[in-house]
Image (cartoon, coloured by chain):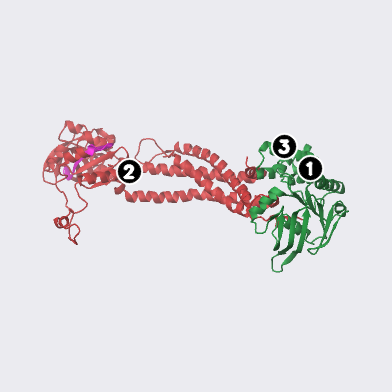
């Protein structure tokens, strides 16, 4: 299996009067269809690593390959285009647009990409919402939904353009355990049944237990990397 | 609908009150811009109309602007010839061969011309003397180039044709002499010729110096009085298109050689004052729109601050900085368009209201309304200026929004 996402010697230093090193020389390869958890204590640099892998942030040094394409030296717009087509993000806070209906939130990335016309985008949005079990909420607004429902809508939005990789930053961090369990199961199914690569940052041990592979981060370095048997 | 526009509209409808305040600023700005500038332009045009109509568009006089080319210069055209102390010749005896030149000018389309012989004379009546300007005219042609016929309060210019010894004077002069229509007075020309003339018409222009010093008689009578038979020293010319005066004047001067002065040339000082006045007016009315644009800037800046999370998520999704900038520029454009639309309607209403206002200048008996210019140019200008200031006001917040870095926001939120 070829690596869908590969990083070599990633270093991220926040410049300033006292420069802060967030990520120190991280190299890893992520295979297609893997469900990976990145774990570590607060401030260990796991989110920073996720931002680097998700092309949201640019490493101080080191290289990232996405789908076999090296992204070093890409400008902001090139990186944005890769994110739009190949990556989907889910964050701890749902970050849905409050003035947009659930369906409009999900179709936002589809419409930005512009490959589907309005009715096809709508149909795809409804399919995704249906798959995540929130299609009844499609006309509602985010504030009318429960936390778990919002996170499922956010996952539907992340899947809108059929990305290769879903990146999740503490996706269950703000949910009760029942909702957290549902979200965990959804992400696992995405990897195992739909062949998506899922990379999730978490410090929730029960969440991590569901993963195929766990990467431990301490002080910006990979401390442990083990696969479930 | 474009996704960027849809986001822009939700931002604006999400902050209805602030959007409304920004909108009212633009509406008032456009309305006042329109009403004040159309009033100013209206009064300017009214002023020019008076200026133009009360005097000939072009006056051809028996003068030449430059001294004649000297034989030495003609002989050695590329030689270093310099002849000093040359003076332009003054044709004291009037315009030479005026009938031929008159025919030449009459042939130009859209031109009406009247030959006049002007000279000084002294009027005496009951022991009083008054120096005046006596113009010998042909009533038929004079009526086509001058408004004097409309200013007649008693008698008419045509009466001169009936009575070759008739004279038309202003009411100011008539009051000075305390005489009326049908009375006789003595006219003494500079040449010494003297003749008793009968007042056959009285005019009042409202301009005291004209009413007290201008007098008209038949051209033939004036030629006899001034001892210049078959001569005139002025052509007064009126054009269908007053603004063509400068070009036509140059054409006439090139054709006949006599000095032709258009009203534009004669009133250059006044016209430049009008330009200054317009600059002042436009800066003042623009200031209203500039103030309004601060309102837009304020609203959009607030939205940018409030929506940094939305901006960050849109960027993480793959929206470019350009898309984000476009969202906020659209917000400026939408406020500008809607504001301009309502502003133009309100402005037109104000213009209509102003045009109903009656003014009463002293000495004028007719009904006069505030002059309003309903030119499409004013509407276009108000809209263009409003749009420009809205887009400019939106630009800075848009640029700031485009620079939002998603990671910084996401780190802060986590």
Q: Are marks 1 and 2 on the same chain?
A: no
Q: Residue drawn at (82%, 44%), measured in percent from left and top?
A: A193
In what quadrant of the picture does the N terminus of chain B appear?
top right
Q: Residue drawn at (71%, 49%), measured in percent from left and top?
A: A86
On the image, numbered disc 3 is attached to which residue?
A123
Q: Image check: B242 left or right of B304?
A: left
Colour chain B is painted in = red
Q: Residue drawn at (80%, 64%), measured in percent from left and top?
A: A219
Check if mark 2's residue and mark 3's residue have beta carbons within 8 Å: no
Under circle 1, the secondary element is: loop
Q: Residues within 10 Å of mark 1 (few under 14, many from 20)?
A: some
Location of residue A111 (image quadrant): top right
Q: Image check: B277 left or right of A78?
A: left
Label 1 marks a residue whose chain is: A
Location of residue B163 (image quadrant): top left
Could you say which disc has been placed on residue B51 in the image?
2
Q: Image check: B385 left or right of A38?
A: left
Q: Residue B120 at x, y = what percent? A: 18, 46
Mark 3 or mark 1: which comes first in sequence?
Answer: 3
* Chain identity for the colour green used in the image: A
State the CA–CA distance, disc 3 to disc 1.
21 Å
Under circle 3, the secondary element is: helix
Q: What range of the chain is rendered magenta?
A: B105-128
State the CA–CA distance, disc 1 to disc 2.
74 Å
């Amino acid at each position: 299996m070829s690596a869908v996402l590969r990083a070599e010697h990633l270093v991220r230093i926040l410049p300033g009067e006292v420069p802060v090193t967030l990520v120190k020389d991280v190299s890893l390869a992520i295979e297609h269809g893997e469900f990976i958890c990145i774990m570590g204590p607060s401030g260990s640099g796991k989110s920073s690593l996720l931002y680097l892998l998700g092309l949201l942030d640019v490493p101080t040094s080191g290289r990232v390959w996405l789908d076999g394409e090296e992204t070093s030296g890409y400008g902001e717009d090139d990186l944005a285009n890769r994110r739009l087509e190949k990556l989907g993000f889910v964050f701890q806070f749902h970050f849905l647009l409050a003035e947009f209906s659930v369906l409009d939130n999900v179709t936002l990335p589809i419409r930005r990409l512009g490959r589907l016309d309005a009715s096809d985008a709508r149909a795809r949005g409804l399919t995704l919402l249906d798959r995540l079990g929130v299609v009844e909420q499609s006309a509602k607004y985010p504030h009318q939904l429960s936390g778990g429902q919002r996170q499922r809508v956010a996952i539907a939005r992340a899947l809108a353009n059929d990305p290769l990789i879903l990146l999740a930053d503490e996706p269950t961090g703000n949910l009760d355990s029942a909702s957290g369990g549902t979200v965990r199961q959804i992400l696992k199914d995405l990897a195992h049944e739909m062949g998506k690569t899922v990379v999730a940052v978490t410090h929730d041990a029960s969440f991590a237990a569901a993963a195929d592979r766990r990467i431990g981060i301490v002080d910006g370095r990979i401390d442990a990397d083990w696969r479930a048997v | 609908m474009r996704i960027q526009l849809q986001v822009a509209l939700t931002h604006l409808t999400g902050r209805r009150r602030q959007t409304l305040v920004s909108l009212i600023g633009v509406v008032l700005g456009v309305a006042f811009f329109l009403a004040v500038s159309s009033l100013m332009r209206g009064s300017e045009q009214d002023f020019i109309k008076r200026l133009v109509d009360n005097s000939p568009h072009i006056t051809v006089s028996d003068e030449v602007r430059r001294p004649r080319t000297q034989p030495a210069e003609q002989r050695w055209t590329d030689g270093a010839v310099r002849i000093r102390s040359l003076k332009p010749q003054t044709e004291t005896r009037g315009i030479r061969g005026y009938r031929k030149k008159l025919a030449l000018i009459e042939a130009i389309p859209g031109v009406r011309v009247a030959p006049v012989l002007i000279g000084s004379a002294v009027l005496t009546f009951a022991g009083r003397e008054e120096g005046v300007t006596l113009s010998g005219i042909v009533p038929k042609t004079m009526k086509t180039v001058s408004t004097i016929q409309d200013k007649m309060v008693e008698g008419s210019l045509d009466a001169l044709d009936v009575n070759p010894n008739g004279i038309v004077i202003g009411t100011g002069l008539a009051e000075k002499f305390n005489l009326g229509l049908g009375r006789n007075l003595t006219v003494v020309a500079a040449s010494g010729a003297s003749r008793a003339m009968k007042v056959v018409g009285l005019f009042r222009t409202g301009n005291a110096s004209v009413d007290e010093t201008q007098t008209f008689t038949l051209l033939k009578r004036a030629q006899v009085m001034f001892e210049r038979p078959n001569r005139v020293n002025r052509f007064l010319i009126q054009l269908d298109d007053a603004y063509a005066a400068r070009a036509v004047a140059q054409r006439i001067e090139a054709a006949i050689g006599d000095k032709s002065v258009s009203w534009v040339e004669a009133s250059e000082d006044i016209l430049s004052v009008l330009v200054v006045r317009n600059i002042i007016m436009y800066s003042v009315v623009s200031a209203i729109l500039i103030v309004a644009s601060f309102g837009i800037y304020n609203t959009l800046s607030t939205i940018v601050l409030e929506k940094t999370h939305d901006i960050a998520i849109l960027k993480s999704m793959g929206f470019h900085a350009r898309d984000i900038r476009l969202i906020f520029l659209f917000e400026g454009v939408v406020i500008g368009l809607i504001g301009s639309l309502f502003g133009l309607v309100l402005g037109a209403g104000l213009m209509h209201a102003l045009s109903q206002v009656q003014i009463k200048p002293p000495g004028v008996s007719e009904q006069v309304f505030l002059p309003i210019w309903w030119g499409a140019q004013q509407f276009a200008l108000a809209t263009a200026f409003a749009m420009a200031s809205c887009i400019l006001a939106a630009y800075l917040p848009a640029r700031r929004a485009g620079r939002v870095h998603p990671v910084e926001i996401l780190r802060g939120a986590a």
